[in-house]
Image (spheres, rainbow, N blue to C red):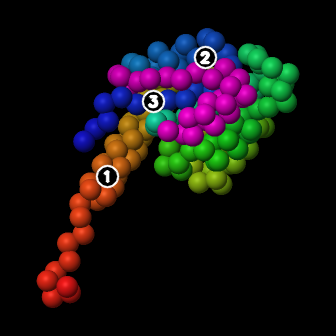
Amino acid sequence: MQKDRIKLLVVEDEPTRMAAIKEWARRAAGDVHVVWASSAGLAIGILRRERGRGFDGVLVDHDLTQANRTSVDDLLSGKDVANAMAEHLDRDIPVFVHSGNRLEAPRLAAQLMSAGFGVTYIPFEVMTYGDLETWLEEVREAADEVTLYRRWQARKRRTPLRVPREFN
């Protein structure tokens, strides 16, 4: 059974990039709900508050300084978001690192992979619609598997244990 709607957390401080990601995601995945975190602090707050519930995929940038909301945001980056992801998200949620920072983006991807996430890393500057479309197919497949597993778990909890007579 396919999940009807996928929910993405997009951590991106550049409004034009965010607009492109939203448009591509809607075009590629159809019914998609995008939660936009324009700063690292906002993303960390969303992850803590939501406790990862409902997110089917995460797109994350490393350098998040253009839309800082507080002075604390000046000290935070995608690495801090990755720490919060490791604390609050299931490891079966696909991650797409789209940062163009040639030094820190590969480190961010490695940090997330070492935490157990499946990571796609393509800098936004060279990312294509097809790249995002392929990743969103992976997100949809993972979300479908999780949905089936959760339904199985719920059915398992509702089904009483049947003990054969010879064991009574």
Specify the label residue 19 is tagged with: none
- Measured as percent of width and height from the top left, residue 92 is found at 49, 49
Is the N terminus in the top left, top right, bottom left or bottom right quadrant? top left
Tell whether position 48 is magenta.
Answer: yes
Say which quadrant the C terminus sits in. bottom left
- x then y, percent, for residue 64: 74, 24
Side (left or right) of 44 relative to 104: left
Q: CA distance from mark 1 to mark 2?
A: 39 Å
Pick the residue in front: 164 or 81. Answer: 164
Q: Which residue is mark 3?
A: 7
How packed mark 3 is, by other alpha carbons closer than 10 Å (few <14, some 14-19, many 20 or more), is some
Task: Give the secondary structure at mark 3.
Answer: strand
Amino acid carrying label 1: it is: Ala
Residue 145, horizontal then vertical, whole percent: 35, 48
Ranked by sequence position, the earlier of labels 3 and 2 is 3
Q: Nearer the viewer, mark 3 or mark 2?
A: 3
Q: Position of residue 152 (x, y in %)?
A: 29, 54
What distance separates the C-alpha of mark 3 from that of mark 1? 22 Å
Residue at position x 49%, y 35% in the image: 55
| Disc nearer the start of the sequence (1/2) | 2
- Residue that numbered label 2 is attached to: 17
Mark 3 or mark 1, earlier in chain: 3
Q: Amino acid at mark 3?
A: Lys
Q: Is residue 136 left or right of residue 81?
A: left
The structure residue drawn at horizontal position 33% and vertical position 55%, both measured from the top left corner, is 153
- Up the image or down, 155 lies above or below 140; here it is below
Which span of residues is magenta-colored? Answer: 28-53
Instruction: Give left or right: position of 138 versus 81.
Output: left
